[in-house]
Image: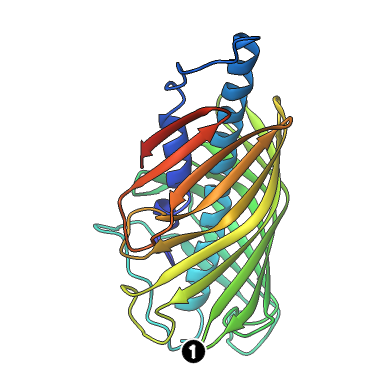
Amino acid sequence: MKHYFNTNKVLSVTALAIGAITIFFACKKDDANPAKDDTKDNNTIAVATSEATVTAIYEDVFSTTLDYNVTELPPSGRKAPEQADNQTCFPGVELVPADMGTYPKTLTLDFGAGCTVNNVTRKGKIVIKLAKLLWLADSKAIITFDNYFVNGIKVEGRLEVTTSAWGDAKKTYSYTVTNGKVTHPNGYTATYNGTRTVTQTEGVPTLGLRDDVYSITGTSTLVDNLGTATVTITKPLLRAFTCASISAGEVSVTLNGHAGTINYGTDVAECDGKATLTIGDKTKEITL
């Protein structure tokens, strides 16, 4: 399906990046208690991987909601988002009431038994209750799920999306996840609550997407069998539309007092596909 700023390449890459480095920590240990040190490191890695995956799922829901508000409802003057290569899969769209003047209304996206784009399979329904058009300032949408899955992971909870600014100077949205929950096919579950602010910092006046740059900030908490993790974007995550991944910014993940940092660099135009993961005294450059 279409995406406002290709979320599959924005935050989900964080999960892939962290997952790819879970075996590199055969480095320096705490001489006093190396086993305990490794356990803390590995637990922090595991929860960072889980949190990044969960964030990517809810970020995808947000961008999908924004996308279909722009392309399925009355024209806003914004060019429709560019589609994925060889895209053939689109959800069913139901708008109730169907007229364009009556609000509130409900927009339901139905992915049926399964719809796959770019190796992401969605099935079930996303239900979006709109107070008014999302490209109007101070508009709001409440999003819930009806037996909704992403790559076999069941997604539950409630998202509230608010448009705080929409104009030639800036476009800013915030979304809050409340009572989020993901259940993996292997039985692993995690609950999630968090808030993200997404601001288009460059390319706002133009209709094309190639000059667009997005900034993401926010905090979240994730609870699973390892404990409660707090996640803070300590430096705004920046991604240019033309880059395949985030190219600037920093994220901190803390589990039971043990913190890790993912640093993506400082130059959004560099697009080098690299980040640095630091946990304790261990540092590793990773390729996204």
Residue 133 x, y percent position in the rendering:
61, 82
Q: Residue at x 48, y 46 (%)?
A: 263
Q: Is residue 113 visible?
A: no
Res. 106 image quadrant: bottom right
Q: Which image quarter is the C terminus in?
A: top left
Q: Residue at x 52, y 49 (%)?
A: 56
Question: How many numbered discs, if any?
Answer: 1
Q: Which residue is mark 1?
A: 168
**Is 121 situated left or right of 172 in this image?**
left
Is residue 139 shown above or below 225? below
Q: Which image quarter is the N terminus in?
A: bottom left
Is residue 172 shown above or below 126? below
Q: Is residue 133 visible?
A: yes
Q: Residue at x 38, y 77 (%)?
A: 80
**Is 213 situated left or right of 169 in this image?**
left
Res. 29 image quadrant: top right
Amino acid bearing label 1: Asp
**Is 285 situated left or right of 143 in this image?**
left
